[in-house]
Amino acid sequence: MHWRQRTQPGQARAHRDPAERQSDRHGRREATVVAGLRELRERCGPAPTHQALAEQSGLPIGWLRWAYPSLEDVLG
């Protein structure tokens, strides 16, 4: 099915509020970072790097460095 095609004639797609989409995206990224750090700490020890977390999670390293200047503060 083409991305513009509707599943049924006359059916419109519900549009979500941009703030809601951004909040959902932030929550998914936060969960990905926390899960990645836990796994890296189990595998590599207590001091994972931004590079290792970027490779583990698939998140851009620039965003990780901007959002989390210190990875130690994420898990506490």
Image: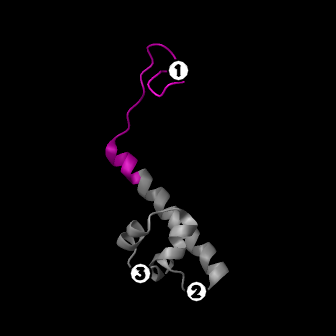
* Residue 18 position within the rendered picture, expressed as x and y whole percent measured from the top left: 33, 44
Disc 3 residue type (three-letter)? Ser
Which residue appears at 47% of the width and 21% of the height? 5
Whether tag 3 and tag 1 are in contact, CB under 8 A, the answer is no
Q: Which residues are magenta?
A: 1-23
Which residue appears at 47% of the width and 60% of the height? 29
**Helix, strand or loop at disc 1?**
loop
Which residue appears at 63% of the width and 73% of the height? 39
In this view, 63 is above or below 71: above
Please state which of residues 73 and 47 is positioned toward the viewer in this rendering: 47
Question: Which label belongs to residue 7?
Answer: 1
Whether tag 2 and tag 1 are in contact, CB under 8 A, the answer is no
* Residue 69 position within the rendered picture, expressed as x and y whole percent measured from the top left: 38, 78
In this view, 74 is above or below 2: below
Q: Residues within 10 Å of mark 2 (few under 14, many from 20)?
A: few
The mark that comes first in sequence, 2 or 3, is 2
Instruction: Give the CA separation, mark 3 to mark 1.
Output: 46 Å
Question: Which label belongs to residue 70?
Answer: 3
Instruction: Give the CA separation, mark 2 to mark 1.
Output: 49 Å
Instruction: Give the CA separation, mark 2 to mark 3.
Output: 13 Å
Magenta segment, prevailing SS (helix, strand or loop): loop
Please state which of residues 54 and 24 is positioned toward the viewer in this rendering: 54
Find out whether residue 6 is within the magenta segment. yes
Quadrant for residue 15, please give it. Answer: top left
* Residue 70 position within the rendered picture, expressed as x and y whole percent measured from the top left: 41, 81
Question: Which label belongs to residue 46?
Answer: 2
Q: As drawn, which residue projects farthest toward the top?
A: 9
**Helix, strand or loop at disc 2?**
loop
The mark that comes first in sequence, 3 or 1, is 1
